[in-house]
Image: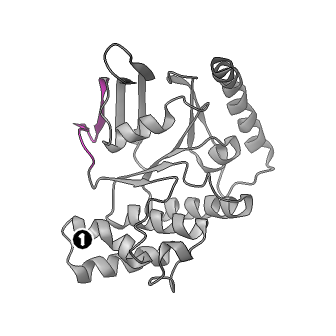
Amino acid sequence: MTQEIIQIDGVSKSFGKADRQVAALNEVSLAFRDGEFAVLIGPSGCGKSTLLYLIAGFESPTTGEIRLDGKKIQKPGPDRGFVFQDYALFPWKTVLGNVMFGLLRNGYSHRDAKTVAMEHIRMVHLQGFERAFPHTLSGGMKQRVGIARALAYNPKVLLMDEPFGALDAQTRKLMQQEMVSIWEATQKTVVFVTHSVIEAVYLADRVVVMTAHPGSVKGIIDVDVPRPRQYTEEHYLHIRQDVLALLEDEVAKSAKALA
């Protein structure tokens, strides 16, 4: 049985002052296995990204605990790479400079950092664009830089917050396919947030469906479909329906709360 690398025990998270707190997460207990591709999905505002930020160490739980390899997460660290939805690239740095940044911050020499960065730039098929600046790149290319930067310092876990949400349909499909190839090559543990059921079932070993605000775990669905997956394959479509069935009531609750 594959070892659990991330343990989330009774985690709740609230924001605001003591007399006016808003609950984002409520008693979330969950574990992610070493080397798996897990996807979090749920209605808007259910706390998916908040949970990802807690795993990253950007925020701390109000109650409960999150552990990585048995050690409590208390702050960000190089054992977790993060890919943001809005790219979060340094506009004054080139592709190479952006990918080297984390390596240099973590003690690599300039020579070694450049060697490792170039390897990861090739991994995401951006060779030839090393000297390009972010404003000259398409959305898909910017996100490739973000993925290369997050993987370059060899984290145990890759956290991805709706990384393909802003892309056009064709680029998004291509990035999904390439993400599977990168994951298969690196065997990282990936925790990926999305609003798309199609994307979730295409990518995931397991899909974690979250309830409406405040978020908790409603159900977990195993995606036992061999890769490479076909969007029209019958079993894939059945699993998509299972995820949609779990989501349906939660999306309705979320919409009603906003009405």
Left or right: 237, with 203 as reference point: right
In magenta stretch: residue 68: yes
Q: Nearer the viewer, residue 2 or 108?
A: 108
Q: Nearer the viewer, residue 67 or 171?
A: 171
The image quadrant where one finds the C terminus is: top right
Name the residue that disc number 1 marks.
Answer: 104
Q: Please, is residue 109 above or below residue 32 in the view?
A: below
Residue occupying the point 80% across, 43% down: 234
Looking at the rendering, the stretch of residues picked out in magenta corresponds to 63-76
- Image coords of residue 179 (percent x, y): 56, 60
Q: How was the colour assigned to the protein in this rendering?
A: one colour
Q: Please, is residue 26 above or below residue 48 in the view?
A: above
Q: Quadrant of residue 59?
A: top left
Q: Quadrant of residue 30?
A: top left
Left or right: 158, with 71 as reference point: right
- Image coords of residue 175 (percent x, y): 62, 62
In magenta stretch: residue 83: no
User: How many numbered markers are drawn?
Assistant: 1
The answer to whether residue 110 is seen in the rendering is yes
Q: Nearer the viewer, residue 193 or 236?
A: 193
Residue occupying the point 65% across, 44% down: 201
Q: Nearer the viewer, residue 203 or 12?
A: 12
The answer to whether residue 26 is seen in the rendering is no
- Image coords of residue 170 (percent x, y): 73, 63
Residue occupying the point 53% across, 73% down: 135
Give the residue type that dot 1 points to: Leu
Helix, strand or loop for disc 1 = helix
- Image coords of residue 92 (percent x, y): 39, 74
Q: Please, is residue 83 above or below residue 123 in the view?
A: above
